[in-house]
Amino acid sequence: MDITKNDSHQEGGMAKAIESQTAKIPSDAFLWTSIASMGVSLAFKLTGHKHTALFIGQWAAPFLLLGIYNKIVKTQGHD
């Protein structure tokens, strides 16, 4: 019994289509986008736009998580 394969739950066509397109994005893109959001956040903070800086600064973690998901899909595939 292979515990990594769950035959009772299959992904839909939309998820497979999205994953096939996002797998084409280089993993570095997510890292650099995250770093860029931190830089833009710092720039807003230095110019006195505190709330905008906090809003944009919170984008870094989701970009990194998307990068991890992208890497998993590339290495493990879907379903």
Image: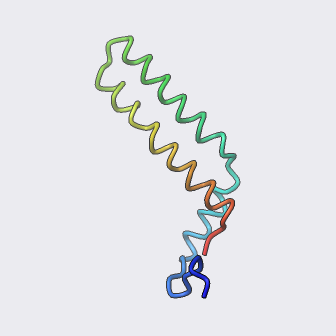
Pick the front one: 8 or 55 = 8
Q: Nearer the viewer, residue 39 or 72?
A: 72
| Residue drawn at the location 49% of the way across and 30% of the way down | 37
Quadrant occupied by the N terminus = bottom right
Query: Does residue 14 appear left or right of residue 29 in this picture?
Result: left
What is the x, y in percent for residue 50? 30, 20
In the rendered image, the residue lying farthest to the front is: 1
Furthest-top residue in this view: 47
> Vertical placement of 69 versus 79: above or below?
above
Residue at (56% x, 51% y) in the render: 68
Dividing the picture into quadrants, the one containing residue 16 is bottom right
Residue at left 50%, top 82%? 9
Residue 28 against residue 50 in the figure, above or below = below
Where does the image place residue 46, in percent across and percent down from the top left? 39, 12
Residue located 52% across and 35% down the image? 34
Residue 24 lies, in percent from the top left, at: 70, 54
Residue 57 versus residue 68 in the image, above or below: above
How many numbered circles does the render carry?
A: 0
**Which scheme is used to colour this image of the protein?**
rainbow
- Give the position of the C terminus as an image quadrant: bottom right
Question: Measured from the top left, where is residue 6 in percent x and y?
Answer: 54, 82
